[in-house]
Image (cartoon, grey):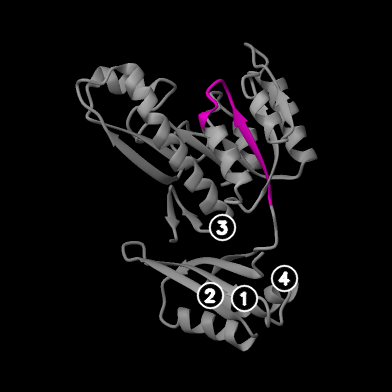
Amino acid sequence: MKNTAVLLLDCPDRKGLVAAISTFLYMHGANILDADQHQDNELMLFFMRVEFSLDDFDLNAQSFQEHFQPIAERFEIKWSLKYSTARPSVAIFVSRQIHCLADLLYRHHAGEFPCRIALVVSNHDAAAPLAAFYGIPFQHLPVSPGSNEQVERHQLALLERDSIELVVLARYMQVLSSDFVARYPWRIINVHHSFLPAFTGGRPYHGAFERGVKLIGATSHYVTDVLDDGPIIDQDVIRISHRDQLPDLIQKGRDAEKVVLARAVRWHLEHRILVHGNKTVVFD
C-alpha cells in the first residue's frame, strides 16, 4: 500500500503559485511523486494536483492545515488533502441492468479501486446473486408509486450506518430527491447511456435509434438536482450504422457504459477530479 497524500487545489491564477506550494512541501520533507496543473485562461483560474510521499513528511493532517493556511490565504486557495491509506466506503445502487455492477465488482475484486464496497442497493432483486458471489451485503428496496420518500429515508439510514462516502449509480433507474443529492455533494456518480447532452431521460437508445445517429455513447457525471445535467467526468462513443437495430444499440452501448463508469469511479477514488461550476478538471 502506498504511503502518500494528494493535495488538490484551485484558486485565481497568479505568479508564484507553483513555487510557493512546491517549496512548502519540500521544506516539510515531502518527496513529490506526481504533479499536474491546469490554467483556465478565460476564467483566470489555476488547478493543481500534487501527490507526494509521506515517508519523511513532518506534518500530520491537523498541523498541515495550520502551516498551509497562510499560503492558502495569500493565494485564495481552496484545497483538500487526501491520504492513500484511507479506504472510503462505497455504496452501489442498481436496478434491473447489472452489467455495470458486475464490472465494478470484478474490478474491485481485482484490486483496481482503493475503497471498500460496503453495500449494494437495488429496487429489484436481479443483482442479489451477483452481490452474494462477491460477499457484498445486498439490500432490496422496491420502489412503488408514492413510496419514494419512504424508500429514500431507508436508503439514507443505510448509507449513514455504513459511513458511505461515495454513492455510485450503476444504471439505477430512479431519480434521487434534491435532499438526497444535497447530502452527498460531488459524491454521487451516475452513468447515463447516451453522449450527453444529447438524448437525456430514461430511453436514450430509443431516441438515438429514431434519430438515425451514427454515433452512440455513454457519460459518467456527478449528480445534481437537474436530471442528467451534472458535471461530466468521462465520455466515450461507439460508431454504428443503418444496419444496427435498437437491440444492437443497447448491446453495443453497454461496453461504453461500463468503461466510462469505471474510469469515473477510479478517478474519484484517486482524487483526480476538481469540480468548478458545471465542469470538471480531470488530472491524468
Label 2: element kind: strand
Could you classify mark 2 by the number of other residues whose Cα lies within 10 Å: few (under 14), some (14-19), or many (20 or more)? few
Considering depth in this image, is 49 or 121 the residue closer to the camera? 121
Q: Which residue is mark 3?
A: 270
Question: Disc 4 versus disc 3: distance between alpha carbons?
Answer: 18 Å
Q: Amino acid type of disc 2?
A: Leu
Return the mark for residue 33. Answer: 2
Query: Dividing the image into 4 quarters, which one contains the N terminus?
Result: bottom right
Could you classify mark 3 by the number of other residues whose Cα lies within 10 Å: few (under 14), some (14-19), or many (20 or more)? some
- Write down the region rendered in magenta: 88-99
Considering depth in this image, is 184 or 1 the residue closer to the camera? 1
Considering depth in this image, is 179 or 58 the residue closer to the camera? 58
Which residue is farthest bottom? 27
Q: Which residue is mark 1?
A: 53
Q: Amino acid type of disc 3?
A: Glu
- The percent coordinates of residue 240 (x first, y second) are 25, 29
Q: Is residue 169 left or right of residue 234?
A: right
Q: Amino acid type of disc 4?
A: Ala
Q: Residue at x 70, y 21 (%)?
A: 141
